[in-house]
Image (cartoon, rainbow, N blue to C red):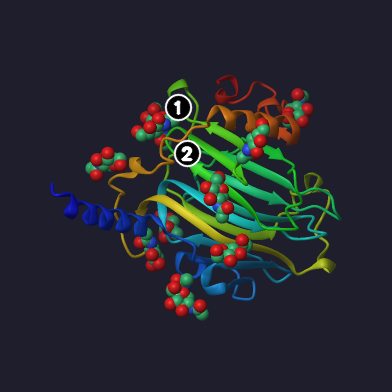
Amino acid sequence: MDETISKPIAFLLVSSLLAILAQGNNFTSDFEVMWGDSTHATVANNGSLLMLTLDEASGANLQSYDLYQYGRLDMLVKFVPHNSQGTITTFYLSSNGTKQDEIDFEFLGNYGNKEYVVHTNVWTGGVGGREQQFHLWFDPRANFHNYSILWNPLNIIWYVDGTPVRVFKNYTLKGAEYPALPMRTIVSLWNGDSWATDDGKTKIDWSQAPFRSWYANYSASDCLVSNSTMSHLSSNCSSYPWFNKTLSSDEMKNLTWVQNNYMIKNYCNDTDTYPNGFPPECYLS
Ligand SMILES: *[C@@H]1O[C@H](CO)[C@@H](O)[C@H](O)[C@H]1NC(C)=O
Ligand SMILES: *[C@@H]1O[C@H](CO)[C@@H](O)[C@H](O)[C@H]1NC(C)=O
Ligand SMILES: *[C@@H]1O[C@H](CO)[C@@H](O)[C@H](O)[C@H]1NC(C)=O
Ligand SMILES: *[C@@H]1O[C@H](CO)[C@@H](O)[C@H](O)[C@H]1NC(C)=O
Ligand SMILES: *[C@@H]1O[C@H](CO)[C@@H](O)[C@H](O)[C@H]1NC(C)=O
Ligand SMILES: *[C@@H]1O[C@H](CO)[C@@H](O)[C@H](O)[C@H]1NC(C)=O
Ligand SMILES: *[C@@H]1O[C@H](CO)[C@@H](O)[C@H](O)[C@H]1NC(C)=O
Ligand SMILES: *[C@@H]1O[C@H](CO)[C@@H](O)[C@H](O)[C@H]1NC(C)=O
Ligand SMILES: *[C@@H]1O[C@H](CO)[C@@H](O)[C@H](O)[C@H]1NC(C)=O
Ligand SMILES: *[C@@H]1O[C@H](CO)[C@@H](O)[C@H](O)[C@H]1NC(C)=O
Ligand SMILES: *[C@@H]1O[C@H](CO)[C@@H](O)[C@H](O)[C@H]1NC(C)=O
Protein backbone atom coordinates (compact mmCIF):
# COMPACT_ATOMS: atom_id res chain seq x y z
CA MET A 1 0.00 0.00 0.00
CA ASP A 2 1.16 3.56 -0.74
CA GLU A 3 2.53 5.00 2.47
CA THR A 4 1.28 8.51 1.72
CA ILE A 5 -2.27 7.12 1.81
CA SER A 6 -1.96 4.53 4.54
CA LYS A 7 -0.52 6.97 7.10
CA PRO A 8 -3.46 9.44 7.05
CA ILE A 9 -5.88 6.51 6.99
CA ALA A 10 -4.12 4.95 9.95
CA PHE A 11 -4.26 8.31 11.69
CA LEU A 12 -8.01 8.62 11.07
CA LEU A 13 -8.59 5.08 12.32
CA VAL A 14 -6.53 5.71 15.44
CA SER A 15 -8.19 9.05 16.20
CA SER A 16 -11.71 7.70 15.72
CA LEU A 17 -10.82 4.74 17.95
CA LEU A 18 -9.48 7.17 20.55
CA ALA A 19 -12.70 9.16 20.32
CA ILE A 20 -14.62 6.00 21.19
CA LEU A 21 -12.18 5.03 23.93
CA ALA A 22 -12.17 8.48 25.48
CA GLN A 23 -15.54 8.02 27.11
CA GLY A 24 -16.17 9.83 30.32
CA ASN A 25 -14.89 12.94 31.91
CA ASN A 26 -18.39 14.35 31.85
CA PHE A 27 -20.56 13.62 34.87
CA THR A 28 -23.52 15.36 33.23
CA SER A 29 -23.70 13.33 30.03
CA ASP A 30 -22.34 9.99 31.26
CA PHE A 31 -24.08 9.56 34.63
CA GLU A 32 -27.68 9.30 35.69
CA VAL A 33 -28.71 10.55 39.14
CA MET A 34 -30.45 7.66 40.93
CA TRP A 35 -30.85 9.28 44.34
CA GLY A 36 -30.56 12.89 45.50
CA ASP A 37 -31.62 16.17 43.90
CA SER A 38 -29.31 18.77 42.35
CA THR A 39 -28.38 20.17 45.76
CA HIS A 40 -27.06 16.73 46.77
CA ALA A 41 -25.49 15.78 43.42
CA THR A 42 -24.00 18.95 41.99
CA VAL A 43 -22.02 18.98 38.75
CA ALA A 44 -19.68 21.87 37.98
CA ASN A 45 -16.82 22.82 35.63
CA ASN A 46 -18.68 21.78 32.50
CA GLY A 47 -19.18 18.21 33.67
CA SER A 48 -15.70 17.49 35.04
CA LEU A 49 -16.41 18.05 38.75
CA LEU A 50 -19.06 16.39 40.91
CA MET A 51 -19.86 17.33 44.49
CA LEU A 52 -21.96 14.95 46.57
CA THR A 53 -23.69 16.14 49.73
CA LEU A 54 -25.11 14.16 52.63
CA ASP A 55 -27.43 15.76 55.16
CA GLU A 56 -30.40 14.54 57.17
CA ALA A 57 -32.65 14.96 54.14
CA SER A 58 -30.65 12.94 51.61
CA GLY A 59 -27.39 11.65 50.23
CA ALA A 60 -26.70 10.96 46.56
CA ASN A 61 -26.05 8.12 44.14
CA LEU A 62 -25.21 8.29 40.43
CA GLN A 63 -24.67 5.46 37.96
CA SER A 64 -23.11 5.41 34.52
CA TYR A 65 -25.30 5.03 31.46
CA ASP A 66 -22.66 2.66 30.15
CA LEU A 67 -23.10 -0.99 31.03
CA TYR A 68 -19.85 -2.80 30.32
CA GLN A 69 -18.05 -6.07 30.80
CA TYR A 70 -14.44 -5.34 31.77
CA GLY A 71 -13.04 -1.88 32.10
CA ARG A 72 -10.51 0.46 33.55
CA LEU A 73 -11.76 3.45 35.54
CA ASP A 74 -9.74 6.24 37.12
CA MET A 75 -11.46 8.68 39.47
CA LEU A 76 -10.02 11.62 41.39
CA VAL A 77 -11.74 11.82 44.77
CA LYS A 78 -11.46 14.05 47.84
CA PHE A 79 -13.25 12.86 50.95
CA VAL A 80 -15.47 14.43 53.61
CA PRO A 81 -13.19 16.45 55.93
CA HIS A 82 -13.14 16.34 59.74
CA ASN A 83 -15.89 14.48 61.56
CA SER A 84 -16.98 12.20 58.78
CA GLN A 85 -17.67 9.22 61.03
CA GLY A 86 -20.49 7.03 59.78
CA THR A 87 -20.38 8.44 56.26
CA ILE A 88 -19.43 6.29 53.27
CA THR A 89 -18.09 7.71 50.03
CA THR A 90 -18.04 5.17 47.22
CA PHE A 91 -16.69 4.46 43.76
CA TYR A 92 -17.66 0.97 42.68
CA LEU A 93 -18.85 -1.25 39.87
CA SER A 94 -22.07 -3.21 40.14
CA SER A 95 -24.33 -5.32 37.99
CA ASN A 96 -28.06 -4.79 38.10
CA GLY A 97 -30.43 -6.89 40.22
CA THR A 98 -30.24 -8.55 43.62
CA LYS A 99 -27.80 -11.39 42.81
CA GLN A 100 -25.26 -8.85 41.81
CA ASP A 101 -21.60 -9.04 40.93
CA GLU A 102 -19.77 -6.09 42.38
CA ILE A 103 -16.26 -4.62 42.73
CA ASP A 104 -16.08 -2.14 45.60
CA PHE A 105 -13.92 0.81 46.56
CA GLU A 106 -15.60 2.36 49.61
CA PHE A 107 -14.18 5.04 51.86
CA LEU A 108 -15.29 4.93 55.46
CA GLY A 109 -15.27 8.22 57.37
CA ASN A 110 -13.82 8.72 60.82
CA TYR A 111 -13.87 11.29 63.59
CA GLY A 112 -11.42 14.15 64.12
CA ASN A 113 -8.23 13.46 62.26
CA LYS A 114 -8.51 9.71 62.72
CA GLU A 115 -7.61 7.87 59.56
CA TYR A 116 -10.04 7.13 56.80
CA VAL A 117 -10.51 3.42 56.06
CA VAL A 118 -10.36 2.18 52.47
CA HIS A 119 -12.71 -0.77 52.18
CA THR A 120 -12.52 -3.13 49.19
CA ASN A 121 -14.78 -6.06 48.44
CA VAL A 122 -15.77 -8.46 45.66
CA TRP A 123 -19.31 -9.81 45.21
CA THR A 124 -20.44 -12.66 43.00
CA GLY A 125 -24.04 -13.74 42.65
CA GLY A 126 -25.10 -11.40 45.46
CA VAL A 127 -22.51 -12.77 47.93
CA GLY A 128 -19.69 -10.56 49.23
CA GLY A 129 -17.56 -11.37 52.26
CA ARG A 130 -14.23 -10.79 50.51
CA GLU A 131 -13.18 -7.63 52.33
CA GLN A 132 -9.75 -6.14 52.58
CA GLN A 133 -9.32 -2.82 54.35
CA PHE A 134 -6.46 -0.35 54.35
CA HIS A 135 -5.23 2.89 55.79
CA LEU A 136 -3.55 5.31 53.39
CA TRP A 137 -0.08 6.83 53.39
CA PHE A 138 -1.56 10.35 53.03
CA ASP A 139 -4.60 12.28 54.25
CA PRO A 140 -7.29 11.70 51.60
CA ARG A 141 -9.42 14.60 52.92
CA ALA A 142 -6.78 17.22 52.11
CA ASN A 143 -6.49 16.78 48.34
CA PHE A 144 -7.75 14.89 45.35
CA HIS A 145 -6.12 11.49 44.82
CA ASN A 146 -6.45 9.02 42.01
CA TYR A 147 -8.40 5.81 42.72
CA SER A 148 -8.59 3.21 39.96
CA ILE A 149 -10.32 -0.08 39.32
CA LEU A 150 -9.08 -2.36 36.55
CA TRP A 151 -11.26 -5.39 35.75
CA ASN A 152 -10.23 -7.82 33.03
CA PRO A 153 -10.61 -11.58 32.52
CA LEU A 154 -7.37 -12.28 34.42
CA ASN A 155 -7.68 -10.14 37.54
CA ILE A 156 -9.11 -7.13 39.30
CA ILE A 157 -6.59 -4.52 40.44
CA TRP A 158 -7.34 -1.63 42.80
CA TYR A 159 -4.88 1.27 42.55
CA VAL A 160 -4.34 4.38 44.66
CA ASP A 161 -2.29 7.02 42.85
CA GLY A 162 -0.94 4.27 40.61
CA THR A 163 0.12 2.05 43.52
CA PRO A 164 -1.68 -1.31 43.54
CA VAL A 165 -3.30 -1.96 46.91
CA ARG A 166 -5.15 -5.18 46.09
CA VAL A 167 -5.39 -7.85 43.41
CA PHE A 168 -8.20 -10.40 43.07
CA LYS A 169 -7.28 -13.10 40.56
CA ASN A 170 -9.58 -15.12 38.35
CA TYR A 171 -9.28 -18.60 39.84
CA THR A 172 -12.49 -19.97 38.38
CA LEU A 173 -10.57 -22.89 36.89
CA LYS A 174 -9.55 -23.80 40.44
CA GLY A 175 -13.07 -23.57 41.87
CA ALA A 176 -13.22 -19.94 43.04
CA GLU A 177 -15.72 -17.30 41.89
CA TYR A 178 -15.01 -14.24 39.76
CA PRO A 179 -17.25 -11.28 38.77
CA ALA A 180 -18.54 -11.82 35.26
CA LEU A 181 -21.81 -9.89 34.85
CA PRO A 182 -21.92 -6.56 32.97
CA MET A 183 -21.60 -3.63 35.36
CA ARG A 184 -22.12 0.09 35.70
CA THR A 185 -19.92 2.58 37.53
CA ILE A 186 -21.55 3.98 40.65
CA VAL A 187 -20.52 6.89 42.88
CA SER A 188 -22.35 7.73 46.08
CA LEU A 189 -22.28 9.36 49.49
CA TRP A 190 -24.56 7.88 52.13
CA ASN A 191 -25.20 7.22 55.81
CA GLY A 192 -23.44 3.93 56.53
CA ASP A 193 -23.22 4.35 60.28
CA SER A 194 -24.68 0.90 60.86
CA TRP A 195 -21.18 -0.47 60.12
CA ALA A 196 -18.73 2.14 58.77
CA THR A 197 -16.99 3.40 61.90
CA ASP A 198 -15.94 1.25 64.89
CA ASP A 199 -18.11 -1.58 63.53
CA GLY A 200 -21.17 0.67 63.69
CA LYS A 201 -20.70 1.78 67.29
CA THR A 202 -19.80 5.34 66.26
CA LYS A 203 -22.73 7.13 64.63
CA ILE A 204 -22.91 10.12 62.30
CA ASP A 205 -22.72 13.49 64.06
CA TRP A 206 -25.47 15.36 62.20
CA SER A 207 -24.43 18.64 63.85
CA GLN A 208 -21.44 18.49 61.42
CA ALA A 209 -23.68 18.20 58.34
CA PRO A 210 -23.66 18.83 55.43
CA PHE A 211 -20.97 16.28 54.55
CA ARG A 212 -19.35 16.60 51.15
CA SER A 213 -17.14 14.51 48.86
CA TRP A 214 -15.75 15.65 45.52
CA TYR A 215 -15.09 13.67 42.35
CA ALA A 216 -13.17 14.98 39.36
CA ASN A 217 -11.67 14.22 35.96
CA TYR A 218 -12.57 10.58 35.79
CA SER A 219 -11.61 8.55 32.80
CA ALA A 220 -13.26 5.37 31.64
CA SER A 221 -12.14 2.81 29.13
CA ASP A 222 -14.60 -0.02 29.02
CA CYS A 223 -15.98 -2.82 26.90
CA LEU A 224 -19.45 -1.51 26.26
CA VAL A 225 -22.34 -3.96 26.38
CA SER A 226 -25.15 -1.43 26.20
CA ASN A 227 -26.18 2.03 27.12
CA SER A 228 -29.49 3.87 27.12
CA THR A 229 -29.02 4.91 23.51
CA MET A 230 -27.21 1.97 21.99
CA SER A 231 -26.64 -1.71 22.44
CA HIS A 232 -23.71 -3.61 21.07
CA LEU A 233 -20.81 -5.73 22.19
CA SER A 234 -17.36 -4.26 21.82
CA SER A 235 -15.97 -6.27 18.95
CA ASN A 236 -12.30 -5.91 19.78
CA CYS A 237 -12.02 -5.41 23.47
CA SER A 238 -8.85 -7.44 23.64
CA SER A 239 -6.92 -4.63 21.96
CA TYR A 240 -7.24 -2.41 25.05
CA PRO A 241 -3.85 -2.23 26.74
CA TRP A 242 -5.38 -3.04 30.13
CA PHE A 243 -7.24 -6.10 28.86
CA ASN A 244 -4.42 -8.52 29.67
CA LYS A 245 -2.80 -6.42 32.41
CA THR A 246 -1.38 -8.22 35.42
CA LEU A 247 1.04 -6.80 37.97
CA SER A 248 4.67 -6.37 36.95
CA SER A 249 7.31 -7.57 39.42
CA ASP A 250 7.89 -3.94 40.50
CA GLU A 251 4.18 -3.50 41.12
CA MET A 252 4.18 -6.75 43.12
CA LYS A 253 6.79 -5.16 45.42
CA ASN A 254 4.62 -2.07 45.84
CA LEU A 255 1.60 -4.26 46.58
CA THR A 256 3.58 -6.16 49.22
CA TRP A 257 4.66 -2.84 50.77
CA VAL A 258 1.02 -1.70 51.00
CA GLN A 259 -0.18 -5.02 52.36
CA ASN A 260 2.59 -5.20 54.97
CA ASN A 261 2.23 -1.63 56.16
CA TYR A 262 -1.32 -0.46 55.55
CA MET A 263 -3.64 -3.45 55.47
CA ILE A 264 -5.87 -3.53 58.56
CA LYS A 265 -8.34 -6.27 57.64
CA ASN A 266 -8.15 -9.33 55.41
CA TYR A 267 -11.02 -11.79 55.01
CA CYS A 268 -8.49 -14.54 54.29
CA ASN A 269 -7.40 -14.57 57.93
CA ASP A 270 -10.71 -13.57 59.53
CA THR A 271 -11.69 -16.66 61.51
CA ASP A 272 -14.64 -14.85 63.13
CA THR A 273 -16.30 -14.58 59.72
CA TYR A 274 -14.95 -17.90 58.44
CA PRO A 275 -14.62 -20.30 61.39
CA ASN A 276 -14.75 -23.34 59.09
CA GLY A 277 -12.21 -22.30 56.46
CA PHE A 278 -11.80 -19.47 54.02
CA PRO A 279 -13.09 -19.08 50.45
CA PRO A 280 -11.03 -21.11 47.93
CA GLU A 281 -9.02 -18.18 46.54
CA CYS A 282 -7.47 -17.66 49.99
CA TYR A 283 -5.54 -20.93 49.54
CA LEU A 284 -4.41 -20.18 45.96
CA SER A 285 -1.65 -17.95 44.69
C1 LIG B 1 -24.07 6.38 26.52
O1 LIG B 1 -25.26 7.14 26.70
C2 LIG B 1 -25.05 8.47 27.15
C3 LIG B 1 -26.40 9.10 27.37
O2 LIG B 1 -27.25 8.83 26.33
C4 LIG B 1 -24.20 9.22 26.12
O3 LIG B 1 -23.95 10.52 26.56
C5 LIG B 1 -22.86 8.49 25.97
O4 LIG B 1 -22.06 9.12 25.01
C6 LIG B 1 -23.11 7.04 25.57
N1 LIG B 1 -21.83 6.34 25.55
C7 LIG B 1 -21.43 5.72 24.45
C8 LIG B 1 -20.10 5.03 24.55
O5 LIG B 1 -22.07 5.69 23.44
C1 LIG C 1 -20.92 17.67 29.27
O1 LIG C 1 -22.21 17.27 28.95
C2 LIG C 1 -23.16 18.32 28.96
C3 LIG C 1 -24.54 17.72 28.74
O2 LIG C 1 -24.52 16.89 27.61
C4 LIG C 1 -22.76 19.32 27.89
O3 LIG C 1 -23.67 20.41 27.91
C5 LIG C 1 -21.35 19.83 28.14
O4 LIG C 1 -20.91 20.68 27.12
C6 LIG C 1 -20.40 18.67 28.24
N1 LIG C 1 -19.08 19.15 28.62
C7 LIG C 1 -18.02 18.97 27.83
C8 LIG C 1 -16.71 19.48 28.35
O5 LIG C 1 -18.08 18.43 26.76
C1 LIG D 1 -18.19 23.09 27.72
O1 LIG D 1 -17.54 22.20 26.84
C2 LIG D 1 -18.05 22.28 25.52
C3 LIG D 1 -17.39 21.16 24.73
O2 LIG D 1 -16.01 21.21 24.84
C4 LIG D 1 -17.77 23.65 24.97
O3 LIG D 1 -18.28 23.76 23.65
C5 LIG D 1 -18.41 24.69 25.86
O4 LIG D 1 -18.03 25.99 25.42
C6 LIG D 1 -17.95 24.53 27.29
N1 LIG D 1 -18.71 25.40 28.15
C7 LIG D 1 -18.14 26.15 29.07
C8 LIG D 1 -19.06 27.00 29.90
O5 LIG D 1 -16.93 26.16 29.25
C1 LIG E 1 -32.44 -3.60 36.38
O1 LIG E 1 -33.15 -4.80 36.14
C2 LIG E 1 -34.54 -4.63 36.28
C3 LIG E 1 -35.13 -6.00 36.18
O2 LIG E 1 -34.59 -6.69 35.10
C4 LIG E 1 -35.04 -3.66 35.23
O3 LIG E 1 -36.43 -3.47 35.38
C5 LIG E 1 -34.32 -2.34 35.41
O4 LIG E 1 -34.67 -1.47 34.36
C6 LIG E 1 -32.82 -2.54 35.39
N1 LIG E 1 -32.18 -1.27 35.69
C7 LIG E 1 -31.13 -0.84 35.04
C8 LIG E 1 -30.60 0.46 35.49
O5 LIG E 1 -30.61 -1.44 34.13
C1 LIG F 1 -11.99 -16.43 34.15
O1 LIG F 1 -10.99 -17.26 33.61
C2 LIG F 1 -11.54 -18.35 32.89
C3 LIG F 1 -10.38 -19.26 32.52
O2 LIG F 1 -9.43 -18.58 31.79
C4 LIG F 1 -12.28 -17.83 31.68
O3 LIG F 1 -12.84 -18.88 30.94
C5 LIG F 1 -13.39 -16.90 32.15
O4 LIG F 1 -14.02 -16.29 31.05
C6 LIG F 1 -12.82 -15.82 33.04
N1 LIG F 1 -13.92 -15.07 33.64
C7 LIG F 1 -14.19 -13.84 33.31
C8 LIG F 1 -15.38 -13.20 33.92
O5 LIG F 1 -13.50 -13.22 32.52
C1 LIG G 1 -4.54 7.61 37.64
O1 LIG G 1 -3.72 6.46 37.80
C2 LIG G 1 -3.58 5.68 36.65
C3 LIG G 1 -2.69 4.52 37.00
O2 LIG G 1 -3.31 3.68 37.89
C4 LIG G 1 -2.99 6.50 35.52
O3 LIG G 1 -2.97 5.71 34.35
C5 LIG G 1 -3.83 7.73 35.29
O4 LIG G 1 -3.20 8.53 34.33
C6 LIG G 1 -3.97 8.51 36.57
N1 LIG G 1 -4.86 9.64 36.35
C7 LIG G 1 -4.60 10.85 36.81
C8 LIG G 1 -5.59 11.91 36.48
O5 LIG G 1 -3.61 11.10 37.48
C1 LIG H 1 7.00 1.46 44.08
O1 LIG H 1 8.02 1.26 45.03
C2 LIG H 1 9.24 1.89 44.72
C3 LIG H 1 10.25 1.52 45.79
O2 LIG H 1 10.29 0.14 45.93
C4 LIG H 1 9.03 3.38 44.67
O3 LIG H 1 10.24 4.03 44.28
C5 LIG H 1 7.97 3.71 43.67
O4 LIG H 1 7.67 5.09 43.72
C6 LIG H 1 6.69 2.94 43.95
N1 LIG H 1 5.77 3.21 42.87
C7 LIG H 1 4.48 3.34 43.06
C8 LIG H 1 3.67 3.62 41.83
O5 LIG H 1 3.98 3.24 44.15
C1 LIG I 1 -8.95 18.29 36.12
O1 LIG I 1 -8.34 18.55 34.88
C2 LIG I 1 -8.22 19.94 34.60
C3 LIG I 1 -7.72 20.09 33.18
O2 LIG I 1 -6.58 19.30 33.00
C4 LIG I 1 -7.29 20.57 35.63
O3 LIG I 1 -7.16 21.95 35.42
C5 LIG I 1 -7.86 20.31 37.02
O4 LIG I 1 -6.94 20.79 37.99
C6 LIG I 1 -8.10 18.82 37.26
N1 LIG I 1 -8.79 18.63 38.51
C7 LIG I 1 -8.23 18.04 39.54
C8 LIG I 1 -9.05 17.92 40.76
O5 LIG I 1 -7.10 17.57 39.50
C1 LIG J 1 -8.01 -6.35 17.39
O1 LIG J 1 -6.89 -5.63 17.95
C2 LIG J 1 -5.66 -6.31 17.82
C3 LIG J 1 -4.60 -5.52 18.56
O2 LIG J 1 -4.68 -4.17 18.28
C4 LIG J 1 -5.34 -6.44 16.33
O3 LIG J 1 -4.13 -7.15 16.19
C5 LIG J 1 -6.46 -7.21 15.66
O4 LIG J 1 -6.24 -7.24 14.25
C6 LIG J 1 -7.80 -6.54 15.93
N1 LIG J 1 -8.85 -7.40 15.44
C7 LIG J 1 -9.90 -6.95 14.76
C8 LIG J 1 -10.91 -7.94 14.35
O5 LIG J 1 -10.03 -5.76 14.49
C1 LIG K 1 -0.47 -8.40 26.71
O1 LIG K 1 -0.53 -8.42 25.31
C2 LIG K 1 0.56 -7.74 24.69
C3 LIG K 1 0.28 -7.68 23.20
O2 LIG K 1 -0.17 -8.92 22.74
C4 LIG K 1 1.85 -8.48 25.03
O3 LIG K 1 2.95 -7.79 24.47
C5 LIG K 1 2.02 -8.51 26.54
O4 LIG K 1 3.15 -9.28 26.87
C6 LIG K 1 0.78 -9.13 27.19
N1 LIG K 1 0.91 -8.99 28.63
C7 LIG K 1 0.58 -9.96 29.47
C8 LIG K 1 0.74 -9.66 30.92
O5 LIG K 1 0.17 -11.04 29.10
C1 LIG L 1 -5.02 -10.56 59.49
O1 LIG L 1 -4.55 -9.60 58.56
C2 LIG L 1 -4.62 -8.25 59.00
C3 LIG L 1 -4.20 -7.38 57.87
O2 LIG L 1 -2.93 -7.72 57.39
C4 LIG L 1 -3.72 -8.07 60.22
O3 LIG L 1 -3.83 -6.76 60.69
C5 LIG L 1 -4.17 -9.04 61.31
O4 LIG L 1 -3.27 -8.98 62.38
C6 LIG L 1 -4.20 -10.48 60.78
N1 LIG L 1 -4.82 -11.32 61.79
C7 LIG L 1 -4.34 -12.50 62.08
C8 LIG L 1 -5.10 -13.27 63.10
O5 LIG L 1 -3.33 -12.95 61.56
Numbered disc 2: secondary structure? loop
Q: Residue at coordinates 49% horizontally, 63% vertically from top-left?
A: 25
- Determine the residue positioned at 64% across, 33% down: 254
User: Which of the 4 quarters of the picture holds residue 157?
Assistant: top right
Question: Three-letter amino acid code at disc 2?
Answer: Pro
Occupied quadrant, residue 277: top right
Q: Which mark is residue 172?
A: 1
Give the quarter of the figure containing the C terminus.
Answer: top right
Q: Residue 70 location, x and y as percent?
A: 42, 44
Of pointers 1 and 2, the one earlier in the residue sequence: 1
> What residue is shown with label 2?
179
Query: Which residue in the rendered view is the most extreme toward the front?
Result: 4
Element type at mark 1 = helix
Of residues 118 and 63, which is closer to you in this image? 118
Q: Position of residue 194 (x, y in %)?
A: 74, 51
Q: Residue at x 58, y 26 (%)?
A: 279
Residue 67 higher or lower than 177, as above or below: below
Note whether residue 272 is visible: no
Q: Vertically, is 19 above or below 245?
A: below
The verdict on label 1 being within 8 Å of ligand 5 is: yes
Closer to the camera, 6 or 232? 6
Amino acid type assigned to the residue bearing label 1 in the image: Thr
**What mark, if any, has residue 63 been given in the picture?**
none
Is residue 181 toward the left or the right of residue 188 in the image? left
Badge 1 vs badge 2, beta-carbon distance below 8 Å: no
Q: Is residue 178 above or below residue 193?
A: above
| Position above or below: 274 against 245 | above
Task: Say few, some or many: other residues with alpha carbon within 10 Å of mark 2 (under 14 / 14 to 19 / 20 or more).
Answer: many
Q: Position of residue 230 (x, y in %)?
A: 31, 61
User: Gap in Å between the C-alphas at discs 1 and 2?
Assistant: 10 Å
Task: State the image coordinates of residue 248 (x, y, percent, origin top left).
Answer: 53, 30
The answer as to whether callout 2 falls within 8 Å of ligand 5 is yes
